[in-house]
Amino acid sequence: MSALASVHSGQEARLLVAQERRKQPLRASVQSALELFFRDLEGHDAEGVYDMVIGQVEQAMLESIMQHTRSNQTRAAEVLGINRSTLRKKLKLHGML
């Protein structure tokens, strides 16, 4: 493979990755954040990653939804596809009530 073909192939690969990232921006953001998290561990063991990620993503989601719905809990629950009591429980859990 010539150097020009190799550069072109590399550019195509980066373009495909960028296109996939735009299709799934949340997934790509979480994956990038986790890659940084594990890199920063510098060989140390990680524990409780599932709860950490779910908690962080859930809180960010709730904050965005509540802002989007102007703190209307009924509408926020509808947008999320959960019942209002579940939403209230999650808002309390994250100190948002």
Image (spheres, grey):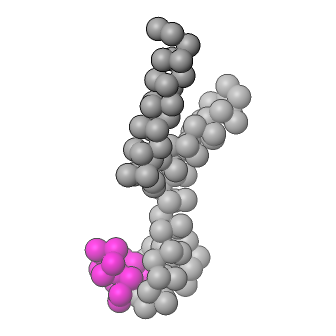
**9 w.r.t. 15: above or below:** above
Which residue: 53% across, 67% down?
A: 60
* Magenta range: 74-88
Location of the C terminus (image quadrant): bottom right
Pick out the residue farthest to the top: 1
**37 w.r.t. 62: above or below:** above
| Horizontal arrangement in the rendering, residue 57 relative to residue 83 (left or right) | right
Which residue: 48% across, 68% down?
A: 61
Front-most of residues 19 and 24? 19
**32 w.r.t. 91: above or below:** above
Residue 57, percent from left and from top: 50, 60
Image quadrant assignment for residue 88 = bottom left
Assign the magenta stretch its main secondary structure: helix
Q: Is residue 83 visible?
A: yes
User: How many marks do you count on the picture?
Assistant: 0
Which residue: 47% across, 64% down?
A: 58
Residue 45, percent from left and from top: 62, 30
Residue 23, percent from left and from top: 38, 52
Which residue: 33% across, 78% down?
A: 79
Q: Is residue 27 visible?
A: no
Residue 82, percent from left and from top: 30, 75
Residue 35 colored magenta? no
Image quadrant assignment for residue 41 = top right
